[in-house]
Image (spheres, rainbow, N blue to C red):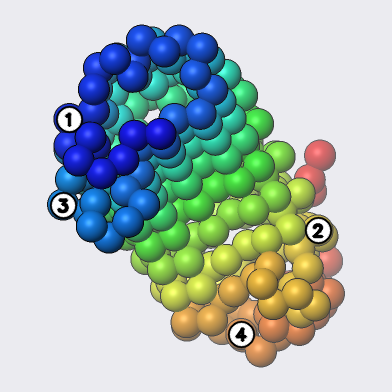
């Protein structure tokens, strides 16, 4: 693990340890916060056996394309940085299961994430994202999706293809309605486990928040009564 003053300019010897599986380059103490990394060295691409890479709480504004060589990576944490974009090479990380991107500066949903077909956990909380792309439907293995504290105005109907979701946080956005086929998300434990959902802080009126808080069955019945059961999206 590299921390503290070493973070400002991490020793390049670290990137010669080709058998390393886990690398943590995140400040773990308040006294370390003045020694954060401003960039991730391109030599990160040498660590091809990494399975976990922790880069939280730095000053990163970008991720080098060499990240795409880490084909064994399963967990990547980049929360609490200054990221606006992700490199297209990230799509090569097809073993990635968990990515943490909370509290960055994303204004556009990074569509490269939709190519990571084995993702089960995605945290994009506390950014400035306004829309979700239709290609989100490709993330069929997602079980946790955290989008709280963004600027979301709309969720596409394709969102409802994410039928393995069991935890979904949508609170503190600008959503006025949910997709008509929201009832397809049958794994959501809404109304039973408060930790698994959050829609509060949205100006929801289709359906109202009080209906959402009663769970998926109530949401489905609401849309069925408003538009008929034939208005749903068929999930294949």
Residue 155: give x, y in percent of width and height.
53, 59
Q: Nearer the observer, disc 1 or disc 4?
A: 1
Residue marked by disc 4: 209
Q: Nearer the observer, disc 4 or disc 3?
A: 3
Q: Nearer the observer, disc 2 or disc 3?
A: 3
Q: Quarter of the image containing the N terminus?
A: top left
Q: Quarter of the image containing the C terminus?
A: top right
- Mark 4 Cα-neighbour bin, 10 Å: few <14, some 14–19, many ≥20: some
Q: CA distance from mark 2 to mark 3?
A: 43 Å
Left or right, 157 with reference to 141 = left
Residue at the image position 68 percent from the left and 68 percent from the top = 196
Name the element at disc 4. Answer: helix
- Mark 2 Cα-neighbour bin, 10 Å: few <14, some 14–19, many ≥20: some
- Mark 1 Cα-neighbour bin, 10 Å: few <14, some 14–19, many ≥20: some
Q: Are marks 1 and 4 in contact (CB under 8 Å)?
A: no
- Mark 3 Cα-neighbour bin, 10 Å: few <14, some 14–19, many ≥20: few
Residue marked by disc 3: 34
Q: Are marks 2 and 3 in contact (CB under 8 Å)?
A: no
Between 4 and 100, which is closer to the camera in this rendering? 4
Which disc is residue 187 wearing? 2
Q: CA distance from mark 1 to mark 3?
A: 12 Å
Residue at the image position 34 percent from the left and 34 percent from the top = 2
Q: Quadrant of residue 235?
A: top right
Residue 109 visible to the viewer: no
User: Tag 3 or tag 1, which sits nearer the N-term?
Assistant: 1
Residue at the image position 58 percent from the left and 30 percent from the top = 74
Which disc is residue 9 wearing? 1
Q: Nearer the observer, disc 2 or disc 4?
A: 2
Q: Residue lying at the far bottom in this picture: please name it.
A: 210
Name the element at disc 1. Answer: loop
Q: CA distance from mark 1 to mark 2?
A: 45 Å
User: Tag 3 or tag 4, which sits nearer the N-term?
Assistant: 3
């Amino acid at each position: 693990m590299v921390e503290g003053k070493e973070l400002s300019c991490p020793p390049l010897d670290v990137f010669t340890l080709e058998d390393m599986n886990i690398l943590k380059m995140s400040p773990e103490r308040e006294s370390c916060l003045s020694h954060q990394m401003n960039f991730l060295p391109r030599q990160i691409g040498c660590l091809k056996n990494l399975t976990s890479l922790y880069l939280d709480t730095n000053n990163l504004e970008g991720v080098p394309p060499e990240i795409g060589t880490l084909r064994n990576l399963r967990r990547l944490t980049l929360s609490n940085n200054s990221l606006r974009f992700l490199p297209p090479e990230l799509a090569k990380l097809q073993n990635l299961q968990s990515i943490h991107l909370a509290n960055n500066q994303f204004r556009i949903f990074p569509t490269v994430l939709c190519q990571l077909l084995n993702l089960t956990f995605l945290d994009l909380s506390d950014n400035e994202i306004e829309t979700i792309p239709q290609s989100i439907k490709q993330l069929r293995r997602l079980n946790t999706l955290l989008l709280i504290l963004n600027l979301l105005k709309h969720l596409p109907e394709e969102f409802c293809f994410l039928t393995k979701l069991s935890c979904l946080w949508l609170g503190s956005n600008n959503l006025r309605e949910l997709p008509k086929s929201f009832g397809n998300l049958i794994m959501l434990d809404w109304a039973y486990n408060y930790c698994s959902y959050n829609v509060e802080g949205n100006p929801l009126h289709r359906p109202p928040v009080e209906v959402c808080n009663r769970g998926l069955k109530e949401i489905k019945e609401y849309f069925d009564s408003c538009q008929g059961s034939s208005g749903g999206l068929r999930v294949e």
